[in-house]
Image: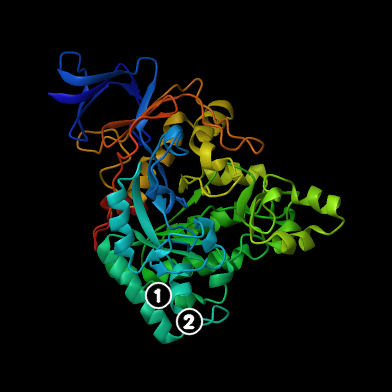
Amino acid sequence: MLDLIISGGTVVDGSGAARFRADVGVARGRITALGDLRGQPALARHDASDRIVCPGFIDVHTHDDRLLLATPHGPHPKLTQGVTTVVTGNCGISLAPLVSATTPPAPLDLLGTDDWRYERFGDYLEALQAARPALNALCLVGHSTLRVRHVADLERPATAHEAARMATDLADALQAGAGGLSTGLYYPPARAATAQEVIAVGGPLTAARGILTMHLRDEADGIDDALREALHIGNALGVEAVLSHHKLIGQRNHGRSVHTLAAVDAAAAHQPVCMDCYPYNASSTMLLAARVGQSSEVLVTWSRGDPSAAGRSLLALARERGCTPEALVEQIAPAGAVYFAMHEDDVRRILAHPLTMVGSDGLAHDAVPHPRLWGTFPRVLGHYAREQRLFSLETAIHKMSGLSARRFGLQDRGRIAPGCAADIVVFDADHVADRASFEHPTTPSAGIDAVFVNGQLACENGRTVHAHAGQVLRRRVGLQSASASQEQAA
């Protein structure tokens, strides 16, 4: 007997292929049957008539390291938009391995000021498994976290001894099940790191076939050099390189995605490389004075220097207080911000590229977060696929499930097919939409009927039903996704 039958729905299976009508049968957390199951007995049934049934979405770019440890109370920012798996530890920032009694330097504090208590990466994975997370999680090791742990002076490149110690930590983490390494050379703790340092630290990735995700050193005027550096690092290590939240910042760089995407295409002919992006023309990170002049507007998302600034326009606050925005940054720091500095044409061009996956880059601990934390995936389905017709629904779902699973080596996820994990979303294609806005950023999305995580109903109509259905996904050392390799060769 089946545990569950999702009946009457139209299946979009995550492969990019055309939709088809089928019932989906689930047993012991796996999809076991696909077709006409009207005569099959089941312990539970979910009517998906007039609905799309697709794989659970994989958020490939998150900072959910700490969020996953907590039991959700009320609507969950990821479950409510159909996300069933997250990739954590991006932009060089991971919660482990680092033990610190004080708040670590920005941007590590984007993960909060406490919980820095994991001596080994495996300790964090064990704690996460014990917490029984709401979502599945594949966890990356942050290069900046390793630097804070081992480099005595963050203003210089690591010594050979320091790089070796970081590489040892990475090897230990990969053995414990980490998915790979992330870098954030844009941020203060890693700005002094050279490409050679990253290659030395990332050495264990090669044999382990781990993945490398990279926040480029520059996403503005220096984008070309930064892109060449990232591609060089990935090629030197011989591993899949993911260009994190690819974008172009500042008016002078609007339109340059034509050239950056051409460079990625050229590189993809001889090395494994792909990208992620979020479907918004505003970014969000730590509050930096250097970013203000590049932006038409800056919204403060949190501030320890002046908590009342959260949710306010930095530019308007500066006018009220009779100072420059840059001077105000110094007064309210440490803080976070949303920057309006991208062009919609670049967002559309990058999002539509066949090598682009979808990642929210949401910051769960901001007082007034960027709406991408709550709205990214329904925005792709509603705004870009249905309303803007940037691509088909099948392509949108592929970018958020099957493509991501292949690139990150998650062979049994991202598809509706027998043998795959039963991570499943049921939604209304005519009405699915993001409702989170910059004014009201934590508003849950519309049109997501049901979300199943490992066969368990985890969220129904925005209400958390099962808060502990997720698993820690440990990448097996030395395993490369065959499908990802085949896709690259094609």
The image shows residue 422, relative to residue 153, as above or below, that is: above
Name the side, left or right, on which 483 lies relative to 352: left
Is residue 441 in view?
Answer: yes
The image shows residue 281, relative to residue 207, as above or below, that is: above
Real-space CA distance between mark 2 and mark 1, rounded to the nearest whole angstrom: 10 Å
Residue type at mark 2 is Ala
Q: Residues within 10 Å of mark 2 (few under 14, many from 20)?
A: many
Residue that numbered label 2 is attached to = 158
Name the side, left or right, on which 351 lies relative to 290: left
Q: Are marks 2 and 1 in contact (CB under 8 Å)?
A: yes
Q: Name the residue at 65% across, 42% down.
A: 344
The location of residue 194, given as percent across then percent down, is 52, 77
The image shows residue 135, relative to residue 286, as above or below, that is: above
| Residue toward you, 275 or 167 | 167
Mark 2 or 1, nearer chain start: 2
Q: What secondary structure is marked by label 2?
A: loop
| Residue toward you, 482 or 419 | 419
Locate the N terminus by quadrant: top left
Residue that numbered label 1 is attached to = 201
